[in-house]
Amino acid sequence: MSKNQVSKNLLLISTSTTYGTGYLEHAEEEVKALLAGKSSLLFIPYARPGGISHKDYTAKAREAFEKWGISVTGVHEYDDAVKAVNEAEAVFIGGGNTFVLLRNLYANQLVKPLQERVQKGMPYMGTSAGTNVAGKSIGTTNDMPIVHVKTFDALQLVPFNINPHYQDPVEGSQHMGETRETRIAEFHQHNRQPVVGLREGSMLRITGDKIALKGLLSARVFLQGEKPMEFGPGDDIQFLLEAY
């Protein structure tokens, strides 16, 4: 593990809301651990779930974090988005459409500043699309490509891909379409990096050069040319940070 990776402080969450819970409530313990000692957060609302405005999406995030003593500002509220990232105590990228999100990250020249700040230890939190863009590419998103992106290359904060909202086949279902597992197998016909199928309610916590699966459910890990593997919370998944 190279020295420039040792300071990483990431929380990559499959989904912002699980059944029966409020926004981010299921991840409260890990969110508080990520943001320990911080009082403010920069929210990047570019993914716009359901077409929600940047203003309204930021207000939703602000309401959640204020309960935990963290003030939230949206990156769109600044004249200089790059400066906002460079001066942020922590960054949270919310879910929505991954293609819209990535296009806006490049358009606002935020990819390199985010990479540099995370390498130096700034806390980074993502949910859904915000977790997708933390990986090597967005090639394993479930989202429709509703806008054109110049590249699938993501922030590459971790050397693998993630499939948030990973779903297992429903026993007894008569649906004949491809499963997530089939789609990821197709991805591995053209790409080498591991893929983590992150079920709803689960999250990955990266601290320094260590990685851990958090939440109640196991994650399904896919390696090119190998059978899928299941890993539960507490299992050793360190090999993911040493991927090519």
Image (cartoon, helix red, strand yellow):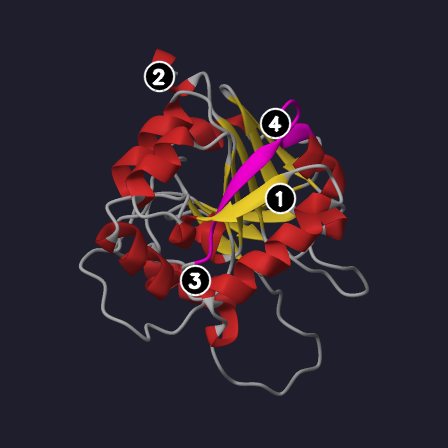
Say what amino acid the circle numbered 1 marks.
Met
Residue 72 in the image: x percent, y percent?
57, 45
Query: Magenta span has 63?
Result: no
Above or below, comparing residue 91 to residue 130 in the picture: above
Q: Do the residues labelled 3 and 4 touch (CB within 8 Å)?
A: no
Secondary structure at badge 2 equals helix
Quick one: label 2, few (<14), some, or many (20+) residues within 10 Å?
Answer: some
Label number found at residue 47: 3
Task: State the residue in front, 131 or 242.
Answer: 131
Taking the spot 34% from the left edge, 54% from the top edge, the residue there is 188
Label number found at residue 203: 1
Q: Can you identify the residue that label 2 sits on?
A: 4
Q: How far apart are marks 4 and 2 (CA)?
A: 22 Å
Q: Do the residues labelled 1 and 3 touch (CB within 8 Å)?
A: no
Say what amino acid the circle numbered 4 marks.
Lys
Q: Give the range drawn in magenta.
A: 33-45
Q: Which of marks 3 and 2 is in front?
A: 3
**Image quarter in which the C terminus is found:** top left
Secondary structure at badge 4 equals loop
Q: Do the residues labelled 1 and 2 touch (CB within 8 Å)?
A: no
How many marks on residues? 4
Compared across the picture, whether 201 is left or right of 240 comes to: right
Q: How far apart are marks 3 and 4 (CA)?
A: 24 Å
Q: Distance between the residues labelled 3 and 2?
A: 28 Å
Above or below, comparing residue 200 to residue 161 in the picture: below
Above or below, comparing residue 47 to residue 84 in the picture: below
Query: Magenta span has 42?
Result: yes
Q: In which quarter of the image is residue 1?
A: top left
Task: State the residue in front, 199 or 117.
Answer: 117
Q: Nearer the viewer, mark 3 or mark 4?
A: 4
Q: Nearer the viewer, mark 1 or mark 3?
A: 3
Taking the spot 43% from the left edge, 62% from the top edge, the residue there is 47
